[in-house]
Image (cartoon, rainbow, N blue to C red):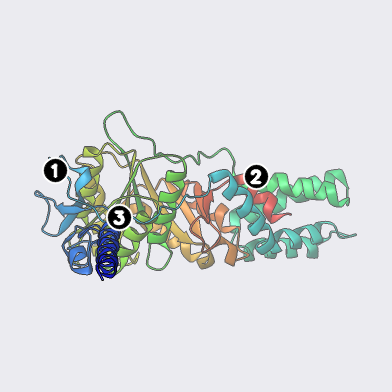
């Protein structure tokens, strides 16, 4: 009897020990409270759904600016940085050289109707006045412009007459040389995006509605990030409802902060001013300012664009004013360019949607009209489908 009782007692003690160990194991595996924020916790975090801004970095209202302008806190001299939610994985933009090769190949496939037509005409057995008329018509349809077309036709006529050649390779070489002259490789196509001694470079991006301006700013930020530059975005397009959020999203993907307003219709000049101020305080390399898409025949809106530039220049020089144009608009783009040039000093052209048109001659027409180079071209919808413009590469793609 005593032996049976002893066995029962040992069994009970053993079960108690096993239970205690199991409970201890469960407690050590349990996630500590607060390790991962709940939705309510997230609402209280900077940048959460309860915040006034959707920046990729926490932001506070600028004390000297119009109410509603939000500046990322890490670009201010704050004693304590608030806790940030876990940042999403950053994308790595494609290097510029890789883009050039890929975009050139794409241009050659989609935009070589001009080159094919010219080579076919120049390589014919007999080049008479009818052939020259067709060549001239082809160039005009490509939006080359009247004066450049006349120059090119006259130069080719003279060279073909002197050489007397019908060899396709020789004709191709002559046409290439004359087209490169028109596109003008001597124009300075570099971007002024390098930081000054005590201030960032400031780039304003302007253009009418629908040309892909905000997207271009986002893609340009990726180009600069790929070149290891510290970039800040300024969302001065305060009239289009989703413009600021769209720009902030572009920035978040590559770790670039955005200064914006959480008030629709806020003063664009105030937002631009605060963006540059934040760029100076944060010692960034480049500040990119997106502006509202203005119709060139709206005098008040164009005047406001001039105001944005003047306000920014109270604290830093505007190094670049890039005009974004849609290549598919053809000669209408020239009208836009002229009006914008009267309001702000355009320093370069960004030509978007060049892959969707055979009117590559618009490059020459715009440069001739403004005396301003095409500096960047967009050839697709991808985030890295923006690259520096190269005159020889462009012509080679047309004639490939």
Which comes sooner in the sequence, label 1 or label 3? 1
Q: Is residue 19 left or right of residue 210?
A: left
Cα distance between the residues tagged 1 and 3: 18 Å
Residue underneath mark 3:
86
Q: Secondary structure at mark 3?
A: loop
Give the x, y percent position of residue 135: 73, 61
Q: Secondary structure at mark 1?
A: loop
Tell me the residue at 35%/60% (across/down). 249
Which comes sooner in the sequence, label 2 or label 1? 1
Eye-nearest disc, 1 or 3: 3
Give the x, y percent position of residue 376: 50, 50
Mark 3 neighbour density, 10 Å: few (under 14) some (14–19) many (20 or more): few
Residue underneath mark 2:
392
Eye-nearest disc, 2 or 3: 3
The foreground one among 393 and 373 is 393
Vertical placement of 216 versus 79: above or below? below
Tell me the residue at 59%/66% (across/down). 357
Tell me the residue at 51%/49% (across/down). 374
Residue at the far top: name it. Answer: 197
Cα distance between the residues tagged 2 and 1: 53 Å
Q: Which mark is residue 80?
A: 1
């Amino acid at each position: 009897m005593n032996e049976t009782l002893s066995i029962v007692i040992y069994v009970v003690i053993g079960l108690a020990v096993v239970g205690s160990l199991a409970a201890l194991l469960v407690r050590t595996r349990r996630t500590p409270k607060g390790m991962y924020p709940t939705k309510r916790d997230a609402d209280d975090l900077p940048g959460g759904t309860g915040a006034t801004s959707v920046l990729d970095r926490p932001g506070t209202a600028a004390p000297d600016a119009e109410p509603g302008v939000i500046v990322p806190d890490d670009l201010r001299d704050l004693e304590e940085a608030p806790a940030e939610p876990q940042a999403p994985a950053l994308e790595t933009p494609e290097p510029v050289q890789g883009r050039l090769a890929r975009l050139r190949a794409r241009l050659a496939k989609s935009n070589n109707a001009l080159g094919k037509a010219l080579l076919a005409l120049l390589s014919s057995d007999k080049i008479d006045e009818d052939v020259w008329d067709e060549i001239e018509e082809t160039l005009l349809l490509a939006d080359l412009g009247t004066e450049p077309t006349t120059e090119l036709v006259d130069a080719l006529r003279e060279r073909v007459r002197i050489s007397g050649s019908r060899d396709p390779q020789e004709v191709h070489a002559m046409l290439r040389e004359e087209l490169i002259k028109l596109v003008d490789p001597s124009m300075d196509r570099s971007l002024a995006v390098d930081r000054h001694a005590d201030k960032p470079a400031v780039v304003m991006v302007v253009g009418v509605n629908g040309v892909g301006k905000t997207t271009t700013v986002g893609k340009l930020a990726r180009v600069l990030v790929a070149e290891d530059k510290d970039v800040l975005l300024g969302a001065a397009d305060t009239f289009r409802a989703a413009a600021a959020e769209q720009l902030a999203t572009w920035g978040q993907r590559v770790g670039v902060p955005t200064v914006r307003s959480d008030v629709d219709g806020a003063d664009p000049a105030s937002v631009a001013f605060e963006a540059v101020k934040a760029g100076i305080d944060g010692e960034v390399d480049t500040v990119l300012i997106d502006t509202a898409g203005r119709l060139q025949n709206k005098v008040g809106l164009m005047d406001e664009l001039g105001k944005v530039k003047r306000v920014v220049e109270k604290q830093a020089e505007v190094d670049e004013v890039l005009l974004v144009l849609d290549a598919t608009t053809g000669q209408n783009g020239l009208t836009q360019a002229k009006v914008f040039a009267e309001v702000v000093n355009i320093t370069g052209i960004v030509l978007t949607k060049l892959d969707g048109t055979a009117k590559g001659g618009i490059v020459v027409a715009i440069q001739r009209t403004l005396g301003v180079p095409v500096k960047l071209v967009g050839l697709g919808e991808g985030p890295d489908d923006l690259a520096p413009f190269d005159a020889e590469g462009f012509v080679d793609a047309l004639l490939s």
